[in-house]
Image (cartoon, helix red, strand yellow):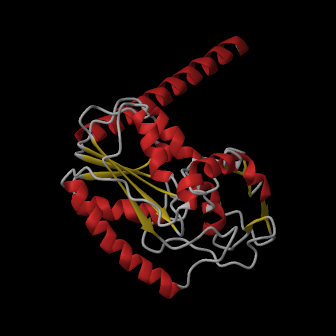
Amino acid sequence: MNRQIGKQIKENIKLELYSFYNSLQFDSYKNIKRMEQMKNIIFYFSGTGNSLQVANDIADNIGECEVLNLAKYDAINPVTAERFGIVFPVYFWGIPNIIKTFLQKIEFEKNIYIFAVVTCGGAAGASLIQVNDLLKSKNQKLQSGFIIPMPENYIVYYNVNSKEKQQKIFENERLKVGIISKVVIDKKEQSLEKSKYIVDMLFGKMVNNAVVKNYPNKDTNFNLNDKCIGCGKCEKVCSVGNITILKGKPAWNHHCEFCLGCLQGCPVEAINYENKTQKRIRYINPNVALD
């Protein structure tokens, strides 16, 4: 009797696993087919929503465009869209770790128009140059690259812009997006935009490589105060799945991108970084809804 029960349990587990595997395969198939049918694709990475806003605004302007969170993308088939864009924030004068990984694994069909937009509160550094270098290793290149200032939100170092200044920045973003969209629609090839400074251009790669390599373990410096209500929002907004809720509290798993979305998005301001953020104002872009 016990053997029969055990055998039945094993069969049930096999059926469940088979069903789960098929669902994954079907979801991947749907994503592939959707990408094959879409004329334009923009991938974004965003912790507080600034880069997502830019991606959405460009997509609205150029039309027939899918906007996808690159943190949730598994490269299976080459991208076959007519135009391919990537939008992300500048991290210490360069690219986030996840952008490097993404560009190393993604493949493109020939004759695809590739553009990039970086968002930043200050210096853009060598970020567009780094993207172009990674594409060259795949026999591709950036046909155009742009810099868009957005509200500063690196709360570990400084406070956010005032509401008035944020509004002015958003107005300027809409104007810049209009210019970018025309270039993309026309598939115009042009020189990559450069930082207005010299020092970050010259030393951007070196500084960026030295700093961001330590980001995966910087989550050890997050701490909780007694305001935490165990709502789980931090787990939901973490696009790289670095947070797990254990016993009603967040636990970080040490593959952090240091986007600070968990800290900025906590509804009760229960998450802080070391002793640096306790008195600083949180920021989430008011024009988008993060995943």
Q: Residue at x 40, y 31 (%)?
A: 138
Count of numbered circles on the image: 0
Outermost residue on the bottom side: it is 164
**204 left or right of 145 in image:** right
Q: Is residue 217 above or below residue 176?
A: above
Q: Is residue 130 visible?
A: yes
Q: Residue at x 53, y 38 (%)?
A: 101
Residue 290 horizontal/vertical position (percent): 49, 62
Viewer-proximal residue among 25 and 71: 71
Q: Is residue 203 above or below residue 52?
A: above
Viewer-proximal residue among 38 and 148: 148
**89 left or right of 177 in image:** right
Q: Residue at x 61, y 57 (%)?
A: 92
Residue 38 horizontal/vertical position (percent): 24, 44
Q: Is residue 246 visible?
A: no
Residue 76 horizontal/vertical position (percent): 40, 29
- Which quadrant would residue 180 be assigned to in this image? bottom left
- Which quadrant would residue 3 be assigned to in this image? top right
Q: Quadrant of the N terminus?
A: top right
Q: Residue at x 46, y 69 (%)?
A: 149
Residue 190 horizontal/vertical position (percent): 28, 52
Viewer-proximal residue among 217 and 96: 96
Q: Is residue 175 above or below residue 86?
A: below
**97 left or right of 53 in image:** right
